[in-house]
Each structure stands twice: as structure tokens, then as C-alpha cells.
Image (spheres, rainbow, N blue to C red):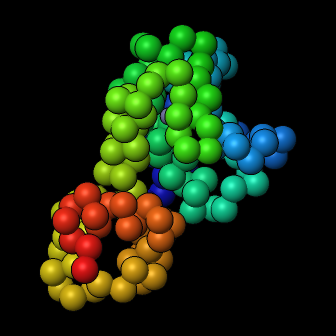
């Protein structure tokens, strides 16, 4: 999944921010210059696959919570923000849906593709994100 193209298609401006402290994953802020009215900032110092998850997570906030985030929210390294745990879980779930579609992952798993590294490469996600997804889908070996 080209998560940056998805963000663009939704009218979200994407900025890789090198000055973020490592305890900040990203943020989404109101931006009248952006087609959607919002810009996503992602920590440029994070590994590339983690940045992909962060972008998908912020897309989740845009899709689900844009009316609730005021001028913007910042996610810390554990994807916590003033929105609270419930909405953070919703954003994580939508991020997983974007990056690791259930049907495709289940099909690959049933076809015997159960190498964590190969699946993580295929979806271009971190091993950690893949493990959480497999566990949540009750596919973990
Ligand atoms: Zn969040």
C-alpha cells in the first residue's frame, strides 16, 4: 500500500519533520493551505516502516476524528494523545486495516506464507506491527 499516495489522495499534506524528539511519532494539525484542511507531520528520525505506520495512524485520525482534534493533536512514541485510549485504538485499527488488509493477510497465511520477515516485507510494515496484526487476527503460530 502506497500510504503517502493515499494521504495525498485525501488532500493531506505530508511533512517529514527532522526536529521531532524521538518520543514523538507524529501529529496532525489544521492547515488552511492543505487541500483537506489538515497536514500530517511524521518524525523523520523514525525507521521508514514506522513512519508508514504513523502516517496511516494520522490518516485514521483524519478519517475518524477530524471534527474532534481542534487545531491538531500530537501522538507520542506509543501513539497516545489527548484524544484518549479509545480513539487511539481506533486510529491504530484503521492504520492496520490500511497497511495490512485482513483478507489479503489471511489468504497469504492460509497459503502457507507464515514467515514473519517475508510477510513484513510484503506489506512493508515493521515486525512489531505485523505481530500485533497476526495476534489480533488469531493467526499467530
Ligand atoms: Zn493517535
- Can see residue 13? no
Q: Quadrant of the N terminus?
A: bottom left
Residue 105 in picture, x, y percent from top left: 26, 69
Task: Indicate the position of residue 59 as horizontal and vertical percent values.
Answer: 46, 37
| Direction from residue 7 to residue 27 in the image, left or right | right
Number of marks present in the image shown: 0
Q: Taking 58 as reference, is 42 left or right?
A: right
Quadrant assignment, res 34: top right
Residue farthest right in this picture:
19
Q: Residue at x 32, y 61 (%)?
A: 133
In the image, residue 1 sits, relative to residue 111, either above or below, namely above
The percent position of residue 57, horizontal first and vertical second, equals 47, 42
Nearer the observer, 140 or 12: 140
Q: Residue at x 33, y 45 (%)?
A: 93
Residue at figure coordinates x 60%, y 13% from the top left:
71
Residue depicted at 81% across the width and 46% down the height: 18
Quarter holding the C terminus?
Answer: bottom left
The picture places residue 78, in percent across and down from the top left corner, at 55, 44
Above or below, 107 against 22 in this view is: below
**30 relative to 55, above or below:** above
Q: Is residue 19 left or right of residue 39?
A: right
Mark yes or no: residue 1 visible: yes
Amino acid at each position: 500500500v502506497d500510504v503517502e499516495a493515499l494521504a495525498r489522495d485525501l488532500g493531506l499534506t505530508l511533512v517529514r519533520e527532522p526536529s521531532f524528539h524521538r518520543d514523538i511519532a507524529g501529529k496532525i494539525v489544521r492547515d488552511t493551505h492543505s487541500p483537506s484542511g489538515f497536514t500530517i507531520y511524521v518524525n523523520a528520525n523514525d525507521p521508514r516502516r514506522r513512519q508508514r505506520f504513523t502516517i496511516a495512524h494520522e490518516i485514521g485520525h483524519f478519517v475518524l476524528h477530524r471534527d474532534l482534534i481542534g487545531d491538531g493533536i500530537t501522538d507520542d512514541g506509543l501513539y497516545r494523545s489527548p484524544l484518549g485510549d479509545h480513539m487511539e485504538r481506533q486510529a491504530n485499527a484503521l492504520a492496520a486495516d490500511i497497511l495490512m488488509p485482513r483478507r489479503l493477510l489471511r489468504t497469504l497465511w492460509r497459503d502457507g506464507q507464515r514467515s514473519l520477515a517475508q510477510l513484513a516485507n510484503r506489506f512493508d510494515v515493521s515486525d512489531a506491527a505485523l505481530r500485533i496484526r497476526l495476534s489480533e487476527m488469531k493467526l499467530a503460530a
